[in-house]
Each structure stands twice: as structure tokens, then as C-alpha cells.
Image (cartoon, helix red, strand yellow):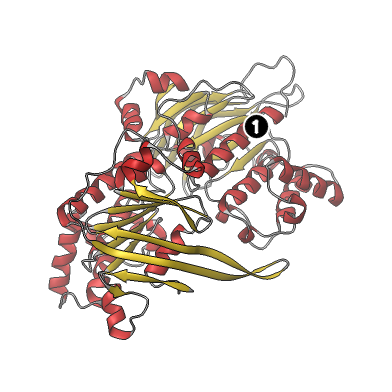
Amino acid sequence: MTPTPGETGPILAVKDLHVRIGRRDIVRGVTLSVAAEQTLGIVGESGSGKSMTVLAATGLLDAPGAVATGSSTLAGTGGSGRTELVGASPRVLRGVHGSRIGFVFQDPGTSLNPLLTLERQITESVEAHRRVTRREATSRALELLEAVGLPDPQARLHSYPHQLSGGQRQRVMVAIALACDPELLVADEPTTALDVTTQAQIIDLIRTLQRDFGTAVVWISHDLGVIGQVADDVTVLRDGAAVEQAPVLDVFDRPTTDYTRELLAARPLVGTGGPPPPVPDATVLLEVSDLDVRFPVITPTGRSTVHAVQDLSFQIRRGTTLGLVGESGSGKSTVAAALTGLVAPDNGRVSLDGTDVLAVRGRAQKALRRRISLVFQDPFSSLDPRRTAGTAIGEPLAVHRIVSGRRQRAARVAELLDLVGLPASFASRYPHELSGGQRQRVSIARALAPDPDLMILDESTASLDVSVQARVLDLLADLQRDMSLTYLFIGHDLAVIQRMSHDVLVMRAGRAVEYRPATELFAAPEQEYTRALLAAVPPARPATLPRL
């Protein structure tokens, strides 16, 4: 929505905002504002109060026992006065949400209704806030899908969320958020789960739409690299308080607090942290030859086949790390699933220390599976919320009969917790009592329990704050050095891949694009696709962005 001529006040103005849940202060006296066509970046670690601040400021806070005080006003339309959102009635908020404030959340998979078509999910908002016919609402939905760059938008109107990739679902979320031309767009970690190229596309998309609609944007992230690409001004939050507020270039060039400097230092950057030193005379542990995986799928036009992995071959040497990198849908996780027996390949050979992994059966298969461990991306969903950390770590010890008796198992669990830098007392804690980094350390301890030859780390740090990610990466490097572990490290962030990997395999559409030692690949990438992945990584310092 184009701002009223002559209007100079902010679209959203927040003053002395406090949020208390029970006896705990979650947000402490935050003041901020954002004007039309401007982007305010809010950054901080998990638990810093980023999302809680914005939810309270926009009237979306509904946590049990939560009390918000202070002021948050939204600019009036057509010359009318400002609307107070803190303490506003449900009727006022219903008129604002979706109409004047649009929201794009982190996970489109949980934000979109799996039972409704894209057309219905977009037209729902238009029909609720605008007096239009069903035909006009459908026309608006098609216009929005075209605006966000969704391929074949006419056909996609009748698609369901599960039929889209992660990046496409996020584009749909942007379309829904902009359906009623809101004055304010709230983007809460909208690119965290996306690969770097898709992330760059979503950033460009929102900036372009901001130019076209004149929207003010509040962008929440834990990654200062992303904030540097999108924001005009930055508010840094810690423990619910604003510790630094400045233009984006001032934050990068002249940070005034140690906390901001720590966030900047924790960012993985291509070219600043080289790969680990080579392992002399390392023998081949895993050899994959001509791996081929297909999946039957049902599409709107009938049955089809997805060729997820095509004729893939690679080796991993003992005590080294192979970085497997590519965009979403490139086949990275399918490779991990094939190596661990979660997916049956259609063709190929997988040899672990001379033994054909795909050919063994029965007890021999169980013994072989013990030698390959897997750490997933999301430690919260991969840990059973009803079981303690000690039970999760001890399960493979019991399944593979590595130790006998509860006392020996408890002693081994304590040793494993110590290996990953956690006290033995954490064995009695449940996943919801742990931070994201602590949960991932428990997942790593569980993967170490059977004393594997190979650990597969599937986007194991992608969902973590940059500071927590840095500590987990240091832990993995220390474990590899001390225990001569072998890793298959799957990721989409080339800066992280460079830091961890001895060799790098770049995949695209199921095929190997480039496979070389890390030092050679990062010094002089041969393929255009690899150069595009490198170019999409946020720079160390943001360039001065021209106003669109």
C-alpha cells in the first residue's frame, strides 16, 4: 500500500514494550519503529525475545499467562489516527491481521493448511477482508502467484502444499501475506530452513515486492549475514532487551557491544575458515559406485517417477569429512537414506570397509548398521519427547548389546554426555528442558553410542543459531581429531562445508556436478553451478543496497 502523501511517521511504532509470563520478564522495555518502504532487522539468539517482541507488538501474543504492557501503534489509513495494538480487542485485531499486517513465518509446512488448495488459502484472506466475488478473489490469487514467481501459476492454483518444494511453499506464504496489500509485513525467520540460493531468491522477492507495494518490513533472524542483506536498520536483542540499535552498516563496521561482536564473529564465511588439515595415508572407508534411487509419485496428471539420485559415485577416507552440498531437492538426504537402509536403491554398490552394505541380511545387516550412525537436522523432532536424554542415548547401547546391565549403561551414557560437553545430570532431562544446541549434542552422543565407523550429519547445524552452530562445529571437529571419526557432512551452506570438509561433492538434480578436494574447489570452482552457490552466501559486510 502506498503511504499517504505527506505522511512521515512510522508504519509501526513500539514504545517501552514489556512482556511477562508468570514471574519471568520475556521482553524488557523494547522501543523500535519502521517506516514505509523500510526494513527493520531484529536479530539475536534463540530465547532473546525476537519473536515474542513482534508477536506482542502486533497483537498475536496468546501464550498462557502472558501480559504485555507498553504501546505499539499502527499507522492509520486515509488520514485516520493510529491504531493501538497492545491490549486491543479481538474485533480490532481481526480487522488488522491479514489485512493491514501480513505474516511470513519460518516453516511454511506448518503454516499452510495441507487440506486446502493454494487458491483457497489465498482467496480466504481476500474474501475475509475485502468485499469481492469469488471470481475476483481467484483472479487476485493468480495475480499474486505470478508476482511471487511461482512457475505455471494457473496450474498451481489447484495444487496442495505437499506438491511444492520448500522454496515454493515460502513463496506462497509471501503471496498470502501480501494478498490484501498490507502496510506492514512481518517475516519471522523466513529463510532459515532454505538453501542459500533459494534464500537469495526469497530475499530478492520480498525486496522487489516491497518496492511495488510500498510495504514496511520487520525481518526477524538469528543470522546477521541475512540481516545485512535485507535491513536498513538493526535492533539487536539479548535476554529480551535491545542492546544495540543502529543503521545496518554501523552495526557491521562499528558494533558497540561485545554481544554484537560475538554474533558477527560466529558467522561462517567462505574463505575465512579453511578446511581441516589433510589426513596422511588415509585408507578408503566408504565407497559408493553408480548409486541410483527412484521414487514413484502420484501427480495431478497421473503416476510418475522421481529420479532422486543418478549414477552417483564417491569415496570417503578414514578420519576425513566429505562435504555433500546442493540445493533442496538435489538428492543429498536421499543419499543418506540409502546408506543407512532407510531407502532401497534401484542400482549401485555401497562398500563399507570392503563389505557390501546393500547385500548383507539378518544379523550381519544389524551388525553392519551399527557401524553407520545418523544425526538429523532437527534435534527436537528426532528425539522422543516422552523419553529422557539418557534413555535416548542408551537405546543403541541396549539394541546392539554393547553393555549389559543398567549400571554399566548409565556409566556409558555419562561418558558420552561428557564427550559432547554436557554434565551427567542431563541424562534425566527431557528434550523440552534443553536448548537447541543441547538437544543436538544429545543427538550426537546418541550417534556416538554404538562406536560407529561413519557418522552421517544431515543438515545437523542448519536450524541452530550461528553462535550455537559454531560451538557444535567445534565439537564435531574435536571429536573427529580425538577419535579419528569419519563424517559425511550434508549441508547447503558452503561456508560451513568449507570449515568442516576435506573433500566436497556438489550435487544438482541427483547428479554429481563437481567432486574435488575442498582446497581446490574453493580456490577455483570449475562449474558455474558451484560458483552460483558460492555467490549466494551472504558476504562478510553488506554492500550498500540501492533503493528499489
Quadrant housing residue 236: top left
430 to the left or right of 244: left
Instruction: Specify the farthest residue to the front.
Output: 526
* Rendering coords of residue 204 (x, y %): 59, 34
Q: Point out the image quarter for the C terminus.
A: top right
Quadrant housing residue 320: bottom left
241 to the left or right of 167: left
Instruction: Specify the farthest residue to the bottom.
Output: 362
* Residue in the foreground of this view, choosing between 207 and 66: 207
In this rendering, is residue 305 above or below 236?
A: below
Residue at figure coordinates x 21%, y 66% from the top left: 451
Label 1, residues with CA under 10 Å away: few <14, some 14-19, many ≥20: some
Residue at figure coordinates x 43%, y 33% from the top left: 225
Quadrant housing residue 538: top left
In this rendering, is residue 21 above or below 380?
A: above
Tag 1's secondary structure? Answer: helix
Residue at figure coordinates x 59%, y 21% from the top left: 546
* Residue in the foreground of this view, choosing between 129 and 80: 129
Residue at figure coordinates x 55%, y 22% from the top left: 545
* Rendering coords of residue 507 (x, y %): 47, 53
Residue 52 appears anywhere in the view: no
Quickly name the residue at label 1. Answer: 208
* Residue in the foreground of this view, choosing between 106 and 373: 373
* Residue in the foreground of this view, choosing between 343 and 387: 343
In this rendering, is residue 112 above or below 56?
A: below
Residue 510 appears anywhere in the view: yes
* Rendering coords of residue 286 (x, y %): 30, 64
Q: Amino acid at mark 1?
A: Thr
Q: Point out the image quarter for the N terminus.
A: top right
* Rendering coords of residue 492 (x, y %): 44, 48
